[in-house]
Image (tube, helix red, strand yellow):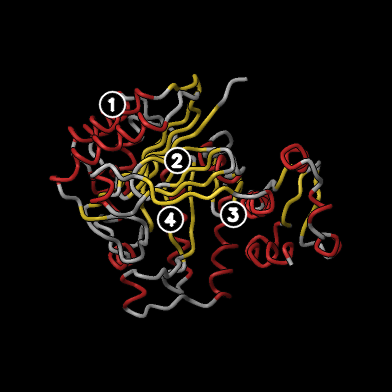
Amino acid sequence: MVIFMSIYIHIPFCNNICTYCDFCKLIYNKKYISKYLDNLEKEIKERYKGEIIKTIYIGGGTPTSLDEEELTSLLKIIKLFNLCDNYEFTVEGNIDSITNTKLEIMQEYGVNRISLGVESFNDNIIKFLGRKHTRKEVFTKVNLVKKFFTNINIDLIYAVSDDINIVENDINDFLKLNIPHISVYSLIIEDNTFLKVQGFKNISEDIDYEMYKYIEKKLESKGYIHYEISNYAQKGYESKHNLVYWNNDNYYGFGLSSTSYLNNIRRVNTRNLHAYLNGFYFYYEEEEDINIRMENEIMLGLRKIEGINLKVFRDRYNINLEEVYNIEFLLKEGYLLKDDNYLKIAKKYLYVSNEIIVKIFN
């Protein structure tokens, strides 16, 4: 049987640290890059078993913070993988570090999808979030990217301010770009971020919900498919890589802080740069028992608008979902729906999906 696999690669370096970011990252320092890439290649050679790769995602951090020579060295490592014919290969980038030459390099080495950290088109919000671009530069750089790639995503953050006009303008600006995918996230104030330290508070849930519904209605009216709680795509442009996570499928993670999920074992790499540079990649791993795996299947699968494939659930765990979890009340009250062998959250309750999932486990 042919085994297909996905790969995530973490590049922790950034040109600046954003005010809301709690990912594993550090300010770009040229003296670390070459050794980091050498160790990344060593880790891959140690762990990769030759499976056929269907998706690759290089995230961070900011992969495009690497200079042209460093980016080339990174992408040469990808030749170690056995790629299938219709692979998806995404690289994350920031508006301020995207250049014509870097796009040429990415195209040359087989990248076919770009994900851009835009976050907002409002110059005041951009500055507040610690980004280093302007609204004008977003249009300039996205049009540059479109010369090389058609499969483009932008990340957008809403609910930074309680002014819904900002959200409306952001979505309208996105639509002007005519690109096929957008990931839209409500601002979360994470621990150990500048916003948390400064005591910044989230806006009210009522206004947040109003913004969420505006985004959903506007994007769907323009032909975008709402296929996951925070993600919208034109037909055929859904993120194949992220669907691997939401389907609870296997994937490798390489690089600092990355996570792998292989054969029911979740492995987490170290977040300590010096440990990683000295060849100590591994932090911890745990084998997930069937109960944890089923819970993950539900938590991840119900993020998708189509929901959980009940036949796949049965095949994986040799039991029907309804035999494990009492969902009769949630079905009766209309929170959950069964639709053509799928179990999904009713669209009007997606915003409170976490509360519904908690009810499934109680």
Label 2: state its secondary structure. loop
Question: Which residue is disc 4 drawn over?
Answer: 156
Viewer-nearest residue: 204 or 121: 204
> What is the spatial separation of the Cα atoms under label 4 and label 3, in whole angstroms?
14 Å
Label 1: state its secondary structure. helix
The label on residue 229 is 3
Q: Is residue 187 above or below residue 224?
A: below
Residue 54 point in image, percent of width and height: 50, 28
Residue at position x 37%, y 62% from top?
22
In which quadrant of the rendered view does residue 18 lie? bottom left
As shown in the figure, which amino acid type bears the numbered disc 1? Answer: Lys
Label 4: state its secondary structure. strand
Question: Which residue is disc 1 drawn over?
Answer: 76
The label on residue 179 is 2
As shown in the figure, which amino acid type bears the numbered disc 3? Answer: Ile
Q: Is residue 344 above or below residue 236?
A: below
In which quadrant of the rendered view does residue 189 lie? bottom left
Viewer-nearest residue: 332 or 98: 332
Q: Are marks 4 and 3 in contact (CB under 8 Å)?
A: no
Residue 91 point in image, percent of width and height: 36, 38
